[in-house]
Amino acid sequence: MPYQPDPSRPPILTPAGPAPAPSYASRPGAPFAPAAARPLPRNPYLRLFALPGTRAFTAGNLIARLPMGMFGVSTVLLIAGLYDSYALAGTVSAAGLVAGAVTAPWIARLVDRHGQARVAVPAAAWAVLGQLTLLLCAHGRAPEWTLFAAAVLGSTAPNTGGMARARWAHLLRDDPAARHTANSFEQAADELCFILGPVLAAFLCSALFPEAGALAASALFLGGILLFAAQRGTEPPVAPRTAGGAPLRAPGMPALLAVFLATGAVFGAMEVATLAYVDGPAAGPVLALQAAGSCAAGLLYGRVRRAAPLAACLAAMSALMALPLLAAVTTGALPVLAAALLVAGAATAPTMITGMGRVQRLTPPDRLNEGMTLAVTALLGGIAAGSSTAGWLADHAPTPLHAYLTPPAAAALAFLLCTATGRGRPRGRG
């Protein structure tokens, strides 16, 4: 059932058209009310932030999202440094990811049912409590089982990126072109956070003390969530429950989640393959180039008028993900491999932007956070599968080079799943 706006609330005007758009002023009972006209920026991203309240909620969300790239690295460095075991550190981190994959859809369902502010703040506080418990257990050299218990305890972090996308979807519900630009911005923000987060965590843990990364991540996460939740004017209203059921039952959603699962395998495999092949301090900066290429491509993709079909994006990903393998086979030179990763990363953002746009269209409006969280959960499952597959190849194949076979194979599988179901090609804009 399409979303029906509350007749008591005036429609939200968006600055997507070329004509001057009205400015907005808050008033009780309505998120924004039109006031005097003002000229619009030409840049589509600046037009997004001409809407009142969008800068504040975006700032809070970015602060809260940055620690998502810090927690894993901080946990591994903390436990490995204090327990002298990378195996234990990796297993504890994996236990937290598995628990988060189970709890995330339930947290998102509560967000849809009761509102972002009412659920995100206590969920984030509980997640920080679990992280601090893990920190204290590790600092006190507690038994190993307590580390697993604390990691599971802190698996209630809300999907910050999904909540930001839900706000854009609400504010720009009548403007598909602006929604495309907003989704592109959010994907670029994801990539940027996962570039900066691990670097910041590693610096804090090595330059200060082992617990510094986890402490900083916890403070940033909780502070960002509080700032984000305080922006009530842009928060989507709790929509009436519809008879559409869970997003997983929406026609086309299971097939799309299978595509996300295979796409996640591309990301996980590429990371492990690069770490195994480069095998040194240069691995981190070289791998970051893939995320940098995705970030740049996402910002450029947001400026186009029409999104590409998902099948076309996956076909491009299948081809570009073979570039690192070709670079490693033909030259073996690190600069050439770095350039190949930069170009290969350019296929990531358009695929994710188009796929997330498809999720938004398939998901009932009253379950939007849950639908996007299911997509993220599928991605995480794919990342785990791709990482383990590439890791096995790196250890058991004649050379670590064979691990680079996994990313293009996973991308090709995602493309085949997309075309075989006949539902991967979205209609309209992505």
Image (tube, helix red, strand yellow):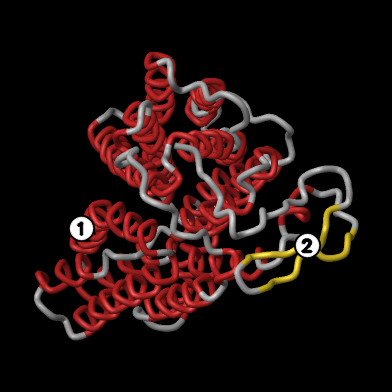
In the rendered structure, find residue 184 and report the number of the disc placed on it.
none
Few, some or many residues within 10 Å of mark 2 (<14, 14–19, 20+): some
Q: Residue at x 81, y 63 (%)?
A: 23
Residue 384, x across and y down, in percent = 29, 43
* Along the line of sight, the residue nearer the viewer: 353 or 282: 353
Q: Are marks 2 and 1 in contact (CB under 8 Å)?
A: no
In the rendered image, the quadrant that contains the C terminus is: top right
- Image vertical order of residue 396 relative to residue 364, above or below: above
Q: Is residue 262 visible?
A: no
Q: CA distance from mark 2 to mark 1?
A: 50 Å
Residue beneath label 2, please? 34
From this view, report whether residue 299 is shown above or below residue 86: above
**Total marks placed:** 2
Question: Mark 1 highlights which residue?
Answer: 95
Q: In the visual, does 26 lie left or right of 270?
A: right
Of all residues shown, which one is farthest toward the front?
A: 8
As helix, strand or loop, the secondary structure at mark 1 comes to helix
Picture coordinates of residue 139, whole percent (x, y):
24, 83
As displayed, is residue 35 above or below residue 143?
Answer: above
Q: Nearer the viewer, residue 196 or 184?
A: 184
Q: Residues within 10 Å of mark 1 (few under 14, many from 20)?
A: some
Is residue 274 visible to the viewer in this orientation of the structure?
Answer: yes
Nearer the observer: mark 2 or 1; the answer is 2
Task: Point out residue 203 in the picture as x, y percentages from the top left corner.
Answer: 48, 72
Q: What kind of residue is marked 1?
A: Ala
Camera-side residue: 155 or 193? 155
Q: Quadrant of residue 74?
A: bottom left
Tell me the kind of residue under disc 2: Pro
Determine which quarter of the picture holds residue 158.
Answer: bottom left
Residue at position x 44%, y 59% in the image: 238
